[in-house]
Amino acid sequence: MSAGKIVSIAKLARLRKGWRKTGRKVVFTNGCYDLLHAGHVHLLEKAKAFGDILIVGLNSDASVRKLGKSPERPINAQRSRARVVAALESVDYVALFNSETPAALIRTLRPDILVKGADYRAGEIVGRLDAGKTVRIPLKRGFSTTGLIRKIKKFD
């Protein structure tokens, strides 16, 4: 069941040791995933193709607010967002993090592959020095959470 994919950082750290011993390749990406859309699914499926285990670091509600996206964000609470992301076939584990960036989580996991959208420049990707390799995936045009929120507000 997808709820079992939502785990603590401590549990992921323990699992990671085992995966390292067996040579399983770990891929990591992160985000808010406030309103899940086809662009998110595209990025997560592409990310999964780089390895055996895909871990998604999910910004907690407090973390989203620290990012200053807007006073109304996140729209969906962290447990709901985690459950939706965990339900995706491409995602193996989801871990919530409270800081503005996933730097500490990446440092703990030391993923083989760190994946971000190509809207980030290579030099500005947090955690790139703690991962084996960093990959930027082109975004699917026409999809953004901010754009969806604007459309929804028009109907208000």
Image: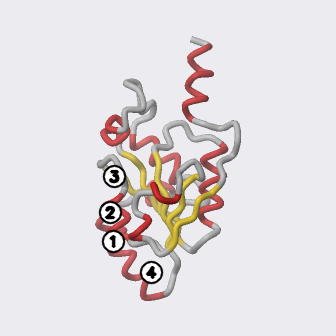
Q: Amino acid at mark 1?
A: Ala
In the rendered image, which residue does mark 1 sit on? 13
Secondary structure category for the residue under label 4: helix
Q: Is residue 60 above or below residue 107?
A: above
Q: Is residue 34 above or below residue 107?
A: above
Residue with the most extreme right position: 141
Q: Are marks 3 and 2 in contact (CB under 8 Å)?
A: yes
**Structural distance between the alpha carbons of marks 3 and 4:** 21 Å
**Structural distance between the alpha carbons of marks 1 and 2:** 6 Å
**Structural distance between the alpha carbons of marks 3 and 2:** 8 Å
Tally of numbered discs? 4
Mark 4 or mark 1: whose residue is earlier in sequence: 1
Q: Are marks 1 and 2 in contact (CB under 8 Å)?
A: yes
Residue at 66% x, 53% y is 138
Q: Nearer the viewer, mark 3 or mark 4?
A: 3
For the residue carrying disc 1, how many other residues have a C-alpha within 10 Å: few (<14), some (14-19), or many (20+)? some
Q: Is residue 156 above or below residue 142?
A: above
In the rendered image, which residue does mark 3 sit on? 97
Q: Amino acid at mark 2?
A: Ile
Mark 3 or mark 4: whose residue is earlier in sequence: 4
Residue 137, x across and y down, in percent = 63, 57
Residue 97, x across and y down, in percent = 33, 52
In the rendered image, which residue does mark 2 sit on? 9
Residue 53, x across and y down, in percent = 52, 70
Q: Amino acid at mark 4?
A: Trp
Mark 1 or mark 3: whose residue is earlier in sequence: 1
